[in-house]
Image (cartoon, grey):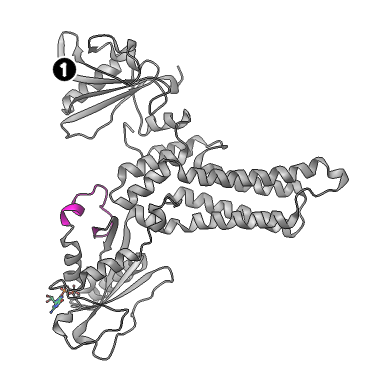
Amino acid sequence: MNREEETIVAPATAAGGAIAVVRLSGPDAAALCDQFFRGPAPLAAARGYTVRYGRIVDGERTIDDVLATVFRAPHSYTGEDSVEISCHGSAYIVGEILRLAQAAGARMAEPGEFTVRAYLAGKLDLSQAEAVADLIASSSRAAHALATGQMRGGYSAALEELRRKLLDLTSLLELELDFSEEDVEFADRDELRRTMESIRREIDALRNSFSLGNAIKEGVAVAIAGAPNAGKSTLLNRLLHDDRALVSDIAGTTRDVIEEQANIDGVRFRFLDTAGIRATDDRLERMGIERTLASIARAQIVIHLLDATTIAGGIPAPDFPLREDQTLLTVVNKTDAAPALVLPDEAIGISALNGTGIDRLTRALRNSIDTEGLFHGDSIVSNSRHFQALGEALQALDRAADGFRNALPPDLLAEEIRGVIRALSSITGIGAIIPDEILSNIFSKFCIGK
Ligand code: GDP
């Protein structure tokens, strides 16, 4: 039997809940369950979308009272016959059901194998399958919107539209080949160049959306930079104050540097560790400064925190390097201790100690992330594999544009454009053959049972 024809089984829920779900998928899913499920009638005879109450038994011994939901191909997540057994959430019960299912002939599923099957059955394209994992990991409204948009296929549709335009280009060029003896040009070169330029702009826009998409998915990195005693720790505590409970136990947030997270109006922000700045001796001080500079380099937003009692001479320029793609927020702290100080409009006056101005600061943080398009269904790239493929598509497109300029023969031109199509197709897997190792690389990051 092919591996794809085997019936697979896996727990679909994490340990510790009141209810657990064990999932089976494959041609024998229902008949196989009948070997250890006792209900009013065999599951093998049940229609799709029916739920049966019954018992899981091991010979004479009852393991649990359960509900079994039957799905019939192709109307299931995997596109195959499937059964989902909802049992009590005991690790022992789940283990027993898995054991019985394997004794009856099922095989334990590999990570992401249910979704692989959904992909192979054409239920999802590759980028939609990847969005399933993003959806499970999403921990903010924006990350959720990003994943659902991609999962529902909005992004795939945009890519398919581009692919169709490129295919039209190649077929025009190939038509010329058929008539090459007669030296005709069906494809008006100016028109073609314009089309290619507009396709280039679209791919470029998608590629550029990655910095937003990635920030939303991973959390927007913020560094708080300022002299010792400016109030960085006090500000951080203030920013995290309202959100502590929410941020403390998001899975997978442990990284190599210390950072705290806060959800501000649907977007997750990661405050990078800049605490190393308070140093007592030279060596420590140097390490602290290096660490701060590294945090600033990784940040999308840098809060330049100044102490109101030390800036009577005006706002100093930042004493750290900034890139063009970074947002600088100039924030003056301890305004409570310098009531006479008048600030320029662009500076945000706060008191981290008593909370004044914090609203304006969180609004400025939130406004520096433009989610307007995201919530209105724009295609936004958040996957680094896609980002890379779009880069390859652009390179191939530039080669094709060179070809145009140098009056390359139509067959060679068409080949360059096919390179663009291949790069785009690798994102969704539509119209492309995706090598096994890329598939297993994508799906190995999934959890068991998904
Ligand atoms: P850091 O070294 O930049 O992390 O600074 P801290 O957060 O440890 O603050 C240094 C000192 O400034 C502490 O004594 C704080 O209580 C004080 N401080 C922080 N924010 C304010 C503020 O808004 N107003 C006043 N008056 N003092 C503040």
Which of the 4 image quadrants contains residue 6?
A: top left
The quadrant the N terminus occupies is top left
Rendered location of residue 165, percent (x, y)? 62, 46
| Residue sticking out furthest to the bottom | 313
Rendered location of residue 123, percent (x, y)? 45, 31
Please indicate whether residue 318 sits to the left or right of residue 437 in the image.
Answer: left
Q: Is residue 385 above or below residue 62?
A: below
- Residue at the spot of label 1: 63
Please indicate whether residue 32 sits to the left or right of residue 230 in the image.
Answer: right
Q: Is residue 29 above or below residue 419?
A: above
- Seen at 40% across and 45% down, the residue is 149
- Seen at 86% across and 48% down, the residue is 183
Please indicate whether residue 177 sits to the left or right of residue 201 in the image.
Answer: right
Rendered location of residue 169, percent (x, y)? 68, 47
Please indicate whether residue 145 sits to the left or right of residue 160 in the image.
Answer: left
Label 1: few (<14), some or many (≥20) within 10 Å?
some
Which of the 4 image quadrants contains residue 286?
A: bottom left
Instruction: Classify the position of ligand 1 by quadrant: top left, top right, bottom left or bottom right.
Output: bottom left
Let me know if residue 274 appears in the view.
no
Rendered location of residue 171, percent (x, y)? 71, 42
Amino acid on which the number 1 mark rests in the picture = Ile
The response on whether ligand 1 sits within 8 Å of label 1 is no
The quadrant the C terminus occupies is top left
Q: Is residue 160 above or below residue 13?
A: below
- Seen at 19% across and 52% down, the residue is 246
Say what secondary structure mark 1 lies in: strand
Q: Is residue 130 above or below residue 100?
A: below
- Seen at 53% across and 46% down, the residue is 159
Task: Report the span colored magenta.
Answer: 244-263
Let me know if residue 197 appears in the view.
yes
